[in-house]
Amino acid sequence: MLHRQHLEGDLLVKVLATGTFDILHPGHVLYLSRARELGDELYVIVARSSMVRHKPKPVIPDEQRLKMVSALKVVDRAVLGSESDMFEPIREIRPDIIALGYDQTFDTESLERELRERSIDAKVVRISDSKTCALCSTGKIIKKVIERYEDAP
Ligand SMILES: Cc1cc2nc3c(=O)[nH]c(=O)nc-3n(C[C@H](O)[C@H](O)[C@H](O)COP(=O)(O)O)c2cc1C
Ligand SMILES: Nc1ncnc2c1ncn2[C@@H]1O[C@H](COP(=O)(O)OP(=O)(O)OP(=O)(O)O)[C@@H](O)[C@H]1O
């Protein structure tokens, strides 16, 4: 059941996107725009630095990353994630769809199973990547900045 009855009687589909969003780039905007197209409202969970363990910790502080993501036109509401339980904000937001990024390590089926085990009725979908931008990766931007400054006189 993807639709939820809105207070005014409209049927609104809530989509949830997630990520670190350390140094925004057009790949983020594309991911969020594609996620937004799946429904009517886009919620975003911005990962806490303390929860990022699979890659270097973000350079930009939690609150600053939240501020930038919140300012994007395509985003209806952004929140910082939980520092202990990733299902906590999902229970509050109650999304109809969770849109995973192309490189997010979660497996769509296993995540759906984990959601069902917690009685959360959200569909999980994968958003494909964009190869339209040469520097659409936070890691690549940081690498380029390091190279540029190392070479600087
Ligand atoms: C459904 C879902 C819920 C999440 N909830 C949280 C959370 O509560 N707190 C948090 O810090 N990160 C949360 N995350 C974000 C992940 O920690 C983040 O996606 C992770 O750092 C990997 O993302 P990246 O490689 O795209 O940066 C969640 C991710 C997903 C898919
Ligand atoms: N070029 C892109 N096209 C589509 N989606 C993207 C692109 N770049 C990032 N995303 C998506 O945006 C979300 C947030 O990205 P995140 O900040 O976590 O990583 P990133 O920009 O890919 O950085 P890194 O290079 O460090 O992995 C992720 O779900 C990711 O899949």
Image (cartoon, helix red, strand yellow):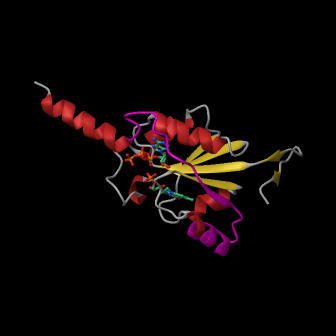
Task: Decide if residue 60 is in sight here.
Answer: no
Find the residue positioned furthest to the bottom: 117
Residue placed most toward the observer, 94 or 143: 143
Residues shaded magenta: 110-137
Does residue 72 lie above or below 108 as drawn?
Answer: above
Instruction: Answer whether residue 128 is magenta in the image.
Output: yes
Total number of numbered discs in the rendering: 0
Find the residue positioned furthest to the right: 9
Residue 116, how many percent across, how many down? 67, 71
Does residue 81 lie above or below 144 as drawn?
Answer: below
Residue 20, how many percent across, how many down? 45, 48
Instruction: Answer whether residue 2 is magenta in the image.
Output: no
Residue 6 relative to residue 24: left or right: right
Does residue 26 lie above or below 38 as drawn?
Answer: above
Give the quarter of the figure containing the C terminus: top left
Residue placed most toward the observer, 79 or 148: 148
Residue 73, how many percent across, how many down? 61, 31
